[in-house]
Image (spheres, rainbow, N blue to C red):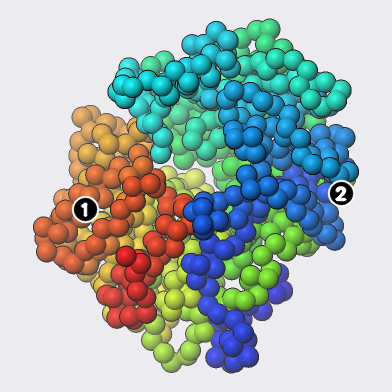
Amino acid sequence: MRRLAVLAVLCAFGTSFGAAAATTHPFTVEDMVAMQRVSDPQVSPDGSQVAFVVKTMDLEANRGRTDLWLAATDGSAARRLTTNPASDWNPRWAGNGTLYFLSTRSGSSQVWRISLAGGEAEQVTNLPIDLENLTVGPAGKALYVGAGIFPGCKDSIPCTAGRLEERAHRKASGLIFDHLFVRHWDTWEDGRYNHVLRVPLGDDGLPSGKAVDLMAGVRGNCPTKPWGGTEDYTISPDGAWLVYSAKVLPGSEVAWSTNYDLWAVPTDGSAPPRDLTAANPAWDAAPAFSPDGTTIAYLAMKRAGYESDRYRITLMHWPSGTTRTLTETWDRSPGDITWTRDGKALLATADNMGNHSIFRIDAATGHVEALVTKHSNVSPQPLPGGGMVFSQDSLVSPAELYRLPGPGDKPVRVTHINDRRLAALRFGDYHQFSFTGAHGDTVSGYILRPVDFEPGRKYPLAFLIHGGPQGSFDDHFHYRWNPEIYACHGYATVMIDFHGSTGYGQAFTDAINDDWGGAPYRDLMTGLDFVLASNPWIDSHRMAALGASFGGYMINWIQGHTDRFKALVCHDGNLDEYMGYFDTEELWFPEWEHRGTPWTNPEGYRKLSPVNYLKNWKTPELVIHGNRDYRVVDTQGLGTFNALQRLGIPSRLLYYPDESHWVLKPENSIQWHHVVLDWIDRWTGTGKSEASQ
């Protein structure tokens, strides 16, 4: 941490450190893509080691590839475990010092294992379908994996493989749908649902029988789509029960309901799943059995149809099913929970005042204790005897692993994967600020000084607007909207957590409902005025605003409400909320945000549509959209570009046939940043960048 602080000081006063400037360079998109991405830490049963995944971007293949690494939890050593050209990920420990993991080495995604005593990796499963989201069951008696299954199949696995083979050879290309979803996020539905399979293991740790679909016939997804993982299910310590989260509803109701329930099924497949949380019409998620098997902790919302309601940690006695809410008075919404090894507490992460923090919640009293508050902290893994290993990143450092010995202790660095890369870079200094925004509430944000800041010089401003809208621009090393890219290109860079943002209490998050163009816009403009008044070195005549998703919507809203910016960048943003409803897939989202459907409350959609203010548009705008974005559909971006062109406003369209809501391929990411920087440079008069054509 001290090294990173020194780097920040060098960036803030770069001209005072000529020697450092001569041997380092400002952070660029190429540097960002070159960073190795640490994720999914898994602590060994004895707590001495942690396995994790490192993702490296392969520019020649234009994709990321993943390998397994191993580190001592005391930070004394780290080494790479796998080097195969295929991707290896999802490591999970067995009690005998063996790591099971998923790999594409065989040509499909299957379970493999590697012994830490030495030797080559060995393939464990050879099923005719791809596997994902691996968990090793208690005592290493079984593996649990996710797979896409046709629910109408009597013999799930071979039947699914047969249907896929038949489809591959079918000449007709028409797709037939009788209910929603038709497509979701970035994928067309094909009739398969994610199911959890059990693969029994013998004493040798290899399959000893037929894989069993524990959700046979279920028209619901676990792991949930599109972002679900192993946190969506849990195995009882005696290995007898699987408890999972899934939305199982008739027909098209899945598209407008958020009613995920917890379901329990015997792991021997002897009975169908039963609904444990049918009484709650809202979202139930992330079940986790306590170490003694007497309690299931899970996350529960209260308001049906609202995906951004506050999660409460709830405890369910097993097997009676009686529940109690543990965190009713804690005004944070955890997104990650795990039991401590002794079962006396839970570790949880949550957005928290512009950071993503880790907390300890006493399982008996509900008392909440903050353990790590600054920066972005995820994936807490409890250690024997207390303490934890976790992942931390910040605006000036990608993720590395740390160990917290105990409450009140300072984190100890475990990995140093990107130290060499960071040592060659200079970043912009940053700090958090606050001001009085809409409704008289305190609103927070971050400001980054340009790299090598020179007092007395005027700098242009890049004003970044986050998506969600229930999200946050926090102290996080982002791989798509990294503020340091702009700061190290010579811009003052500002992000504001406007009303609707997470981490400031549920009332603050709820304030955006039916008010997208109201309080958020006022916060952004008031915050901008505050920043300009507090930082006279920013040139108010050379400002650009940029945003994606809700941020893209807000760019189009800004276009019709102010001309104070010289350039705008709209990535995957709506032009017309009314038609946007009919374009999108998760209908519960606009129905909550705009208070009904377009036919029951048309004014709720129309009053907040940027299309109504086209007569006021005049600012040069870059429009970016992906063909595979089914959340904010590409016709919204094409419509925005059509309007700009017809109005005679200088504009450019950057369109990706192979990207979704996000730009993920490394070469596309590099092009995206060069085109964006070229656009804002052109209109703010900096003239630094040239776009990749």
Find residue 546 and report its horizontal and vertical position in percent: 35, 63
Q: Nearer the viewer, residue 417 or 127?
A: 127
- Mark closest to the chain's N terminus, 1 or 2: 2
Place residue 429 in its image quadrant: bottom right
Which numbered tag is attached to residue 48?
2
| Quadrant occupied by the C terminus | bottom left
User: What is the three-letter code of the residue carrying label 1?
Assistant: Thr
Which amino acid, mark 2?
Ser
Q: Position of residue 213 (x, y in %)?
A: 62, 16
Q: Are marks 1 and 2 in contact (CB under 8 Å)?
A: no
Residue 117 in view here? yes
In this rendered view, identify the residue nearer to me: 269 or 615: 269
The local crowd at label 1, few if under 14, some if 14 to 19, many if 20 or more residues have their Cα within 10 Å, is many
Q: Is residue 248 left or right of residue 641?
A: right
Disc 2 crowd, CA 10 A, few/some/many (<14, 14-19, 20+): some
Q: Which mark is residue 442?
A: none
> Would residue 377 be visible to someone looking at this image?
no
Q: Is residue 443 above or below residue 542?
A: above
Residue at figure coordinates x 37%, y 75% from the top left: 689
At 49% across and 32% down in the image, what residue appears? 225
* SS type, badge 1: helix
Q: Is residue 53 above or below residue 294?
A: below
Decide if residue 26 is on the left or right side of residue 235: left
| Quadrant housing residue 240 | top right
Residue at position x 76%, y 27% in the image: 137
* Distance of label 1 from label 2 (alpha carbons): 55 Å
Residue 640's disc number: 1
How far from the left and from the top, in percent, is residue 88? 66, 43
In the image, 643 versus 603, the foreground residue is: 643
| Residue at the image position 59 percent from the left and 33 percent from the top | 108
